[in-house]
Image (cartoon, rainbow, N blue to C red):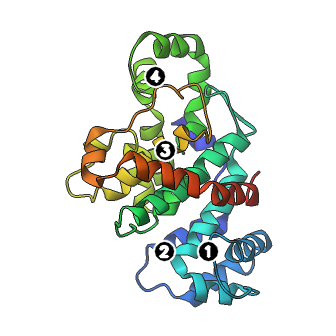
Amino acid sequence: MSRIDNLPTLPTAVAQLSKLIASPTASAKDFEKVIKPDPSLTANLLRLANSAYFGLRREVTSVKQAITLLGNKRVFEIAASAGFSRVIPSVLPGYNIKSADFWLHSIAVAVLAERLATELRIQVPGLLFTAGLLHDLGKLAIGSFLADEQGALLEKLKQQDASFSMTERELLGTDHGEVGEEIAKQWDLPEAVIWTSKWHHQPTKVDENIDSTLVDLVHLADSVAHMFGYGADVGELARSIDTSVATRLGFDVHTIEFVGGDTEEQIREMGEMFKS
């Protein structure tokens, strides 16, 4: 918990937009007032709005135009992307992963989650992109503690057929999902981010009163991202897709292969756009 308190926070504009996205009365004008005073956020918004990922047919030249064409939800997701890229350390201790690889994995999960939803003909849950992007938030705080147990971590992963998060719990009494939940709460992020941070490795434990579709899609996208080599870490071999997720989403290997291959260019483009 002390490590969470000491983490750098997301830019003020992102925190303000997070509150606006949760408000049913927030208007496009409210979003514009928050974004325009932030030159970096404005530049990133326009850059992403004009990227191939969104496929807009005309050039976006102003914040107001971007909000009009993309909508408040997408604008928040762009802000979260830009803000998150600024707080990733150069190397995540314990996971042996560089910032560029961690960022690429995060982007890959966000892009893959949305594309999987489309291919599986599932209505895309609100803020799915952001939930995918921030699913590994807990690694920012837990990594230094895991580094102290590096030898034991590697040994356990070799000796037993256990998931990476299960091994974290054995060594530390918690995992990056639970820690990510606490960071998301402290940063006042939307509930979608809180849920996926907590349960993306344990989709069967999602509370009954919560729609599990969002968590299922991020869980699947996370596994697919690792299959295609986006963001490998020391737990790379201890990844699997929960059978209950496969049953609920109804995908097959051909869908995974198609989505993984067809999104490669988009993932690389988005990864380069905000790479810290």
Disc 3 marks a residue whose amino acid type is: Val
Crowding at mark 1 (Cα within 10 Å: few <14, some 14-19, many 20+): few
Q: Residue at x 45, y 49 (%)?
A: 256
The alpha-carbon separation of the residues under discs 1 and 3 comes to 22 Å
Q: Earlier in the sequence, mark 3 or mark 4?
A: 4
The alpha-carbon separation of the residues under discs 2 and 1 comes to 20 Å
Considering the numbered disc 1 on the image, is that residue within a helix, a strand or a loop?
Answer: loop
**Which residue is outermost to the left?**
208
Residue under numbered circle 2: 21
Q: Earlier in the sequence, mark 1 or mark 3?
A: 1
Q: Quadrant of residue 12?
A: bottom right
The reply to whether residue 187 is visible in this rendering is no
- For residue 43, the mark is none
Q: Residue at x 61, y 74 (%)?
A: 54
Q: Is residue 215 left or right of residue 99?
A: left
**Which residue is outermost to the front?**
254
Residue under numbered circle 4: 172
Crowding at mark 4 (Cα within 10 Å: few <14, some 14-19, many 20+): few
Disc 2 marks a residue whose amino acid type is: Ile
Considering the numbered disc 2 on the image, is that residue within a helix, a strand or a loop?
Answer: helix
Residue closer to the observer: 207 or 267:
267
| Callout in the foreground (4, 1) | 1
The reply to whether callout 2 and callout 3 are in contact (CB within 8 Å) is: no
The alpha-carbon separation of the residues under discs 2 and 3 comes to 29 Å
Disc 4 marks a residue whose amino acid type is: Leu
